[in-house]
Structure formats: structure tokens, C-alpha cells
Amino acid sequence: MREIIFDTETTGLDNRDDRIIEIGAVELENRFITGRSFHVFVNPQGKQVHPDALKVHGITNEFLLDKPDFAKIIDDWLDFTRGAKLIAHNAKFDVGFFNAEFARVGFPEIDPGRVIDSLVLARRRHPMGPNSLDALCKRYGIDNSKREKHGALLDSELLAEVYIELVGGKQAALTLESDDNSAQKQGDDADLPEIEISARPRPLAPRLTSDDIKAHQAMVDVIGDKAIWLAK
């Protein structure tokens, strides 16, 4: 089972107008990180990086001037992701930007059936949150000390470790699941296997002594009709 954990950085928040400027991704095979990765900076073709976005990722307009535009990297991206599930944190954001970029060059949208949103998985597993990437790294003891700013490749590497924990941890990866739907089943909190419980051949001997029973009865007599188990 092959999965791609990916992240993007963009010029802003509106995929109708803003553009992707960085893509990072790492490969999982049967829930193990393979070491294969994809990383590229993308020229936004004249779209300026919004100051608020610059504060988040630190990627400047000047840095992007000599980078390839999206049309020139799309084949490499499709080759890297072909046949794999796609996992992102708040996937609606990243997939929305990819679909907008695909539309500009005449490519079809990403099949939503390929996409798994790790934020949705996190909210199901930890409904009280918080479920940001930093919070999940802290929860699972994953070192994110190098994450001074957002970066697509670093965030993908961290998310890969978080995702493995969300779907059952490294021990679960040892099952080497081959079912294409296994990631979704794990994410949907698949039912735990039933455990058959058989009766003891001989009941355990009571551990209460006669003095314990007398002391308990004395306490009950003192409480009387005010005992909470007598309330109607």
C-alpha cells in the first residue's frame, strides 16, 4: 500500500487568485517512510506573496523569480503520486489549490476518493483537541524543534510521523496491510476485533471477611433513607 503525505505553501489563502509556491511530499509504503521525497519551489507567475503568508513560510517574491512555473513541474508531481493515496492536514486547502492549478493547465481535478484528511482523523481520535500539526507532534513525542516557519517538505516529514500514529502507530504498520481501503478504515476508527470471554471453571473465593460485611452494614444503617441508591 503506497501513500503520499504532502503539503503546500502558497501566496495567500484564496485558490481562485493565489498560487502554489512550494510543494513537499514523502512516500509511505505499508505505513513505513521509504526515504523517497518530492520537493519543489514554484514560480507564481507574477502573483505576489501576501505579507501575512510571508510571515508564515518566509518565502519571498525575489526567491521565486528563477523557479519553474507549475506547468513545468506537473509531470514530475503526477509521476511521484501515481497510484497512491494522498494525505494532507486540512486536505481541503491543499487539494483546492492543486485543483485550481490543474484547471489552469487543463488537467482534471484530483479524485476525492484518493484523498485522506489527517485533520479529520485527528479530530475523530482526539475530539477535545488541539489538533494542529504542532500540537499533534507534542502529543506523540515527535521532535518539531526545527519548525521555526512552515515549510512544505519539513511539514510533510512531520505529518508522516503523525499520520502513522493516528492510524495505529508503528506497531500497526507491521501488519503490512495491502487493502487499498485500509487507511480509510483506520481513519474511520474501524471496530476492534471481538474478544471471546469464557467463564471461569471455578468462581474466585470472596475476599470480604465477616468483619468487612458488618462494618459496611453499620455504615448503611447510619446513612438510612438518605442513601443515594435509594433515590427515585
Image: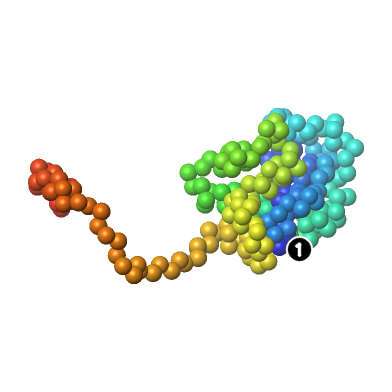
Residue closer to the observer: 48 or 223: 223
Q: Left or right? Give the position of 101 relative to 116.
A: right
Q: Quadrant of the N terminus?
A: bottom right
Position of residue 206 measured from the top left corner of the image (x, y, whole percent): 25, 57
Left/right placement of residue 201 relative to residue 177 reads left
* Farthest residue, direction right: 66
Residue 83 pos. (x, y %): 76, 63
Q: Amino acid at mark 1?
A: Gly
Q: Secondary structure at mark 1?
A: loop
Residue 100 in sight here: no
Residue 37 in sight in this render? yes
What residue is disc 1 on?
A: 83
**Quarter of the image holding residue 203?**
bottom left
Look at 68% across and 53% down and name the residue there: 87
- When asked about the image quadrant of residue 202, the answer is bottom left
**216, 101: nearer the viewer:** 216
Q: Nearer the viewer, residue 156 or 101?
A: 156
The residue at 71%/33% (across/down) is 146
Residue depicted at 50% across the width and 65% down the height: 193
Q: Position of residue 33 (x, y in %)?
A: 73, 51
Q: 209 left or right of 95?
A: left
Circle 1 Cα neighbour tier, 10 Å, few/some/many (<14 / 14–19 / ≥20): few
Task: Identify whether 153 is placed above or below 59.
Answer: below
**Picture mark count:** 1
Q: How is the rendered protein coloured?
A: rainbow
